[in-house]
Amino acid sequence: MNAAISNSAQASYLAPVFAQYPIEVVSAEGVWLKTRDGRKVLDLYGGHAVAALGYGHPRWLKALEQQARSVLFQTNAVAMEVRERAAARLVRFAGLGLDSVFLVNTGAEANENALKLALRITNRAHVAAIEHSFHGRTAAAGAVTHGAASKWYGFPRAPFDVSFIPRRDEAAIAQHVTDRTAAVIVEPVQGLAGAFDLGRPFLEALRQRCDAVGALLIFDEVQCGVGRCGQPFAANLYRVVPDMITTAKALGSGFPCAALLMAPTVARHLKIDMLGTTFGGGPMACAVIEAVIDAIESEDLLANVRRISALIRETCEVGPIVGSQGAGFLLGLKTSRPAKEIQRELLERDILTGTSADPNILRLLPPFTLGESHVVELRDALQNLG
Ligand SMILES: Cc1ncc(COP(=O)(O)O)c(C=O)c1O
């Protein structure tokens, strides 16, 4: 039984697979959550990197309502202008020349498709991933998630060979990425690992090695993409262009959707029926994708992410915070005592933050609309924690 429901002494019929925070959210606006017991909580976690525009953004609401009234759903077998527009908008927003888009529903689904394509195109059976990575809970995405096998991977075997490269270890790349390797999959800024930025030299070295051995480079930007790093994608930030990008979370700012962006060298292998999905590319998702990119561009939210992120890094190294890592609004604050303790104490002060696989990293994934006054609230609260 979850904590919030158990408080009201009602049975929960939800599968008991999630640890839950001790709050129950009943509504939200901007960067604020309202709880059942009447508290107003500053959301620096953004629904796990999802709520890019915050809550109740007028552009998002309008797009969803208009599309719902116009055409609620149509399969990919039926042409729709809104789907074409969303794909074109995403390609232009990225500006990386990855100009073929396959729209899906979740981050894991995007990664499954990217890996499937890489294995098929190269006709190889090995994938290299990075230590401490997280790519999702399905068969292929889970297989390239570091540590999944011993923790929660439920399949009897991985669908291909996998090896893991130590982070930022450029010298180790050649031994893991060989002419047997179909693809390297990497989160340029690792999310669950604690907003750990792998940096340009390592990413550039991966690019070079992939080119040398004919492997494909996949950037998993499910968490770090669509503006979260203060650029359209981390690929823009690090100036390293992969063969494929997978993205989700911020892409729909709460409406479930995901995308696989492919370079022409990948897309030229595509044939009818090679990939498929029922709900992916649905018109509601497409309308929302357009609205999210619209808002990011017209409200200059990338600049806001960069500015406020810098402000957090400059001013919030107080109390138990001893440093920071990550990029933009995928920020890891290094803590002098367990991050879980600090998270709990901040929530008692009405600020919601995240933790990570690193016990000494407090993770911030706030809406892109976060402002200076919110940073002051965070700083003051941290200062008071000691
Ligand atoms: C980097 C990364 N890849 C993939 C996923 C899986 O995405 P989804 O839960 O939408 O399947 C996540 C989810 O947290 C993620 O952070």
Image: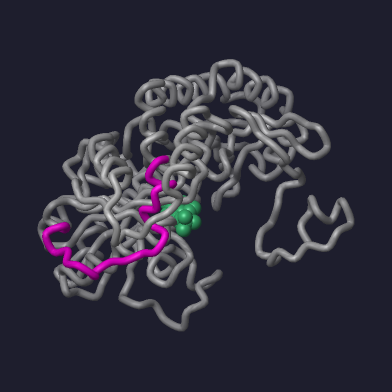
- Which quadrant is home to the N terminus? bottom right
The residue nearer to you, when weighing 376 against 51, is 51
Main secondary structure type of the part rendered in magenta: loop
225 above or below 299?
below
Where residue 214 appears, as percent x and y from the top left, is 12, 62
- Which quadrant is home to the C terminus? top right
331 above or below 313?
below
Where residue 138 appears, as percent x and y from the top left, is 45, 68
Direction front: furthest residue: 70
Q: Is residue 269 left or right of residue 52?
A: left
Q: Is residue 223 left or right of residue 111?
A: right
Locate residue 241: give its quadrant: top left
Q: Residue 274: say if magenta.
A: yes
Judging from the image, the colouring scheme is one colour
Where residue 117 appears, as percent x and y from the top left, is 24, 66
For the point 86% across and 51% down, the residue is 7
Total residue callouts:
0
The residue nearer to you, when weighing 12 against 384, is 12
159 above or below 337?
below
The residue nearer to you, when weighing 226 against 350, is 226
For the point 36% across and 33% down, the residue is 293
Q: Is residue 66 left or right of residue 77?
A: right
- Magenta segment: 266-287
Q: Residue 357: say if magenta.
A: no
Q: Looking at the image, can residue 45 be seen?
A: yes
Q: Looking at the image, can residue 190 be seen?
A: no
The residue nearer to you, when weighing 133 against 279, is 279
Where residue 369 appears, as percent x and y from the top left, is 50, 25
77 above or below 47?
below
For the point 83% across and 63% down, the residue is 11
For the point 26% across and 72% down, the residue is 126
